[in-house]
Structures are given as structure tokens and as C-alpha cells.
Amino acid sequence: MSLETLTVLAIDDDSGGAELLRRHLEGISGFDVTFIHAGSPSESKKTLVGNSVDLIFLDHLLGAETGLKLLEQLRAAGELRPIIAMTGQGDEYLVRDLMRKGADDYLVKRDISPELLRRSIENATSRFHRRRLESLTKDLARDLKKKNDILEQKNRRLAELYDTAHEFVDNVSHEFRTPLTVIKEFTSIMNDGLVGEVTAEQKEYLGTVLDRVDDLATMIDDMLDISKLEAGLLGATRRVCTVEDVPGRVQKTLERKASSNQISLVFPAITSSLAIYCDPEKIGRVIINLTINAIKFSDEDSEVSLWVKEEPGDDTIRIGVTDHGPGIAPEKVAEIFERFQQLDGDIRSSTKGFGLGLNIARELVHLNFGDIDVKSEIGEGSTFSFTVPVADPKKLIHRYLDRIDTFRNGASYVSLVTVEVDPSIGEPERSDVERFVQHQIRRTDLVVSAPSKGWVVVAVSKQVELGSLIQRIKQAHLDANRNRPGAPLSDIAMTVKGTWPVHDGREEFMKFYECELAPLETVHA
Amino acid sequence: MPERPRLLIVDDDRRIAQAVAMRLKAAGYDVQSAHDGEAGLAAATEQLPDLVVLDIRMPKIDGLSVLARLREQEQTRHIQVIVLSACAVDECRALDAGAFCFLPKPYDPQTLLDSISAALNSDIPVGTQAG
């Protein structure tokens, strides 16, 4: 049988008492005891530093210095090892004091026997282990809290930087665009003959200036979009709009661009009043980028046509630009949407922009839940086209979840939040409330119409994380009411209905959505 | 002959205000200008123009606050506002605040003229246009 080794320090000014203790200890079976005696507190402190003592016996009566005082000093100095106090008699108050000051057990000297010692040692040792564990836990908790504080601080700093970056990009845009506005308007005032007649030659040059100003404005947008993409700041304000809202907003710019390049631009006559769901400004930018690209690569006097068609099977509309330029070789088609790719070109000597246009177009299409595609034949020309989803809530949610799933590698959760409003409100109040909600949600979240005149927010968060969002929207609602002329904005009630993992919980999410909120109406235009 | 519509241009960039004014005068409008938000609000309140062409980022009071104030005041509530801004991000806020439409700078002169005439002929009460 192997013996448990135990190094014991006895602190006792009475060497007879210490000797008695040693004998009893040696009488315990199963222990191989090394016994060290210290006759005074100062001696004991030296011994504790130098020796690998496992256990301390402390006599309560230590001459001028009582054991109680030494005990207190040892514990205050961080002494964790088990201490067994020894008293002359079983004084209840004294024992309570000793235990309170940090003794792990106590023995009345005259009762000492090997058996009692063994039990006391076990008792004290187990208390010591518990105490050490508690102390470790406390240290860990303190450490964790410290790290947590640092993380929170860093998070706050990141949020600040994010806002600053946003503001900065917006300011850059503003600073570039302001002088361009002056150049463009004064040039066109001259060009239009508002300040005196212009010759045909002057008119041509002024037209060139206007054309290049538009190029520059597009390049600024491209550069800023790219930097926002890089920084993860590019978002979209998607809303329900009609097909005709979209190409119309860029028609003038594109027509001038085409005519200054002697290209005949065919603009579609839009008859569809289909409701689609997108950020019209961003989709307008896609049309500009694709059309400018087509014009760049077309010969003079050729035709570039823009077209729009419904694709009912896919619940999308497709917007396309067809040119009769040189076309793209099949092996190059895959690269065409990457940055700085221009077919005939060394970007450094190119006068055709940064080569960012198609890359940005693709990103902006994806941001609006669409796909972009190119069909091309060498010598025949190219057709670039992209899709924009129809405003059907259920299908939008699917597209949205697809995007989150791909984008986040299946790691995220989505929560479903209902936004309810008094069903008796009419237009335009409902549109106002919808726009309010749309602008309040985060750029990563989706809002679609639900039955009973309300909305559903699909948020990329767990339920617990949504409290602050809802709180913020409530505050914004109060603020909006303060500034609203006439009646206050209708009250809204927001409820978090549940959280599901995006990747594995899709079916359950949709089932819940359909059962809880069915039957669905089509989205209100 | 009906009276010419009266327009107020509010833009802190004097050259932009001047150019817009030239363009609009040439189109037959009666045009006044102001060069910061405070002056713009005062001019709109005093002159009660038919329409305000409003910049957003301006000293003293920004355009969005001017728009909010115009909507608050009984006598200016009916005035149509077209926002001209060099920041695309202002579009939503401008429409929310009750602008008739938003045109990004550099704007297309013909689009500006078309928008003004649409706003002046609009039957929809001010502040309720959908974005």
C-alpha cells in the first residue's frame, strides 16, 4: 500500500505540545508525515515561504501574539493552504472566531487522537480544495468581465467608426458633386443659348463638356460604391415601386450620353404597371452602368436598345441592354463582372473609365435580390440583362433567406417580427407608416406586407438581440409624431414571434409564417 | 394673363442658386433666392412662393429642418418643395419630410423644369405623395 505523503507545519510556542502532535500524526495509518515545528509566528512565516508545506496546525495560544491574529495575517497575505486551529478548550465563541478568520477546522488539544486527526485533515483538505476552486472561479470571472468590457468598448468604437465612415463617404460625394453641378448648369445655360447665341462649333464643344461631366459623376458614384462595398457599408433602401419608376429616372442622362457618341438609343415604352421590389436609385445605377458600357463598345451610328420584359414563371422582371458591338469571347464571359476587366484593354492607358462598372452593376443587382447575366457573340454584339423581383411577400422572403444563407455561410439566425397597425386606416396613411418602418429597420433586414394591413420584418438576429431595435423604432415613432404636420402617425405594435436558424430552419420558418399570418394578400403598391 | 408662378431657390452655393435662377427665369418663372436655411425659411414664410427648390446641406438650418418647419406652419403647409441635393442618401429623408420629389446634383436641367411643372400642376395635396 502506498503512503500519502504530507508535510505538516505545526506553529506552537510550546514544544511539548508540538511533540505530542507529531506522535499522534505518526500514528495515523496511510500517511507518511514530514513534521516541521515553528515556535513563533516569524519563524512560521519563513518556513511557509521556503517549504512545500501541505497543511498547517496553528496553536491558538502563541505567547504575546494570539493564533487568531496570525491566522488573519496569513489569510490576508493570500495563504490558501489548509489551516487547522488548535485550542486549549472547546470555547464556542473562540471556535467561531477562528473559523470566521479562515481556519478550515479546529481541534481541542486534550481530545487529540490519530483518528480525530485523520478526519480533521481530510475535512480541512476538502475545504481547501473548495476554497481554491472558488478563488479560481472568482479570478476567471473577473478576467472574463475585464475581457468583456474591453470587447464592448471595442464594439462601441467600431460602431462609431462605421458611422464616421458612412458620413465620410457621403461627404466626399457631396464635395465632388457640388462643383460638378456648377460646371454642368453653367455649361448647359450657354449650350442652350440662354446667355447669347452659340455657334455650331461652340455647341459641339459645350456638349462634350456636358457629356464628360456626366461621365465624371458616374465615376464618382462607382468609386464611392466600391469603397462602400469594401467597407461593407453598401446598403439599399428597397421598396415597392412600379416598373415604370425605374428606367425613367435615368432616361435623360443616357439619351444625352448616346447622342454625344452618335449612338441611337432605343428606350422602351413601358406599359406594365407591375409592382416590383427594389431600391430604384440603385437599379437606376445598374441601368446606367450597363448602358454606358454598351455605348462605349459600340461603333458610331449603331443602335443600343434597352428593354424590359416580365418573366412570370420566375416572378421577376428582366431589364436588358443590347448592343451591336464586337461581342465577348466565350472564355472571357466569366471574367467580365470582375473588377478592372476590359476586353481590349490595358486599364492604365484606357480612357474608358475604371473598369468598375460591370462589377458594381452585379453587386447592386445582388443587393436587390436579382441575378445578372450576359449573352454575347463575337462580331454580333452583347446583351446584358438582370432581374428585379416582383413584390410578392412570400417569394421575397425566400430570395432574402437565400441571400443571407449564401452570404453568411449558414451561420445565422433570422427572427420574425410582426408590425401591426389599425386595420381601418386608409391610404395614404398606410404608405406613410410602411415607409416609416422601411426606413427604421437595419440595412440587413427585410420588410414585406402581411395580411390584416400590417407588415412582417425578417431580421438577421436572434430574438434577444431585437429589444434595442424595437426600442429604437418606438423612439423614432415618437420623434416622427412630433414633426408630423396634422395628425400623428398611426400607432404600431411590434412583436417578436420567434427565431430560426437560416440554413436548417427555413421550412419551419416558412410554415410558421404561412400558418400564423396566412392568407397572404399581394403586396400593396 | 395669369400671374407667373413664384419660385424660391434656397442653396448656400451662390453659383448654384444663380444658375438655377437663370434657368428658371428663362423658363418664365418669377424667381427669388436665399443662401442659407434660416434666410430660406424666412423668405418662404414672408413671400409664400408657389414652390421652393431646396438644398439639404446648408449652414444655420439644414434643408430637412426647413422642410419640416414649412410643413408645420399653417401658412406655408401648402407650398410644394423640390429637393436638390448632392447626397443620394438624402432622398428618403426628403420624401419622408414631404418633398414633392428629389433630384440628385448634378441635376438634369430639363428634368428640373419637368418636375417643377408637375409639382405646380399636381392635384395631390402637399405632403402625401408616395415615395
Image (spheres, coloured by chain):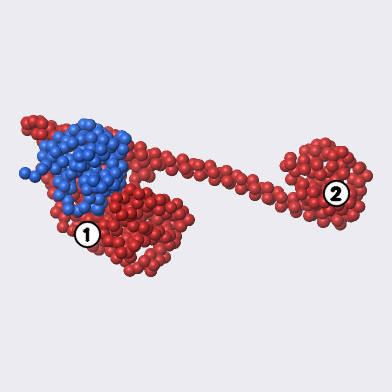
Chain colours: A red, B blue
Disc 2 target residue:
A86
Q: Identify which amino acid the numbered label 2 is placed on.
A: Met
At 88% from the left edge and 40% from the top edge, which residue is drawn? A63
Left or right: A344, with A445 as reference point: left
Of all chains, the one bearing label 1 is A
Nearest the viewer among A406 and B55 is B55
Judge whether residue A367 can be spotted in this image: no
Left or right: A56, with A250 as reference point: right
Crowd around label 2: few <14 · some 14–19 · many ≥20 (10 Å):
many
At 71% from the left edge and 50% from the top edge, which residue is drawn? A131
Disc 1 target residue:
A274
How many labels sit on residues?
Answer: 2
Q: Identify which amino acid the numbered label 1 is placed on.
A: Leu
Residue B5 lies in quadrant: top left
Q: Which quarter of the image is occupied by the N terminus of chain A?
A: bottom right
Task: Where is residue B100? Give x, y as percent.
Answer: 22, 48
Q: Vertical placement of A348 versus B126: above or below? A: above
Q: Vertical placement of A187 versus A333: above or below? A: above
Residue A198 lies in quadrant: top left
Task: Where is residue A69? Give x, y as percent.
Answer: 80, 42
Task: Where is residue B11? Give x, y as percent.
Answer: 24, 36
At 86% from the left edge and 57% from the top edge, which residue is drawn? A115
Tag 2 secondary structure? strand
Nearest the viewer among A69 and A421 is A421
Task: Where is residue A201? Give x, y as percent.
Answer: 8, 31
Left or right: A48, with A227 as reference point: right
Of all chains, the one bearing label 2 is A
Q: Which quarter of the image is occupied by the C terminus of chain A?
A: bottom left
Q: Vertical placement of A103 versus A499: above or below? A: above
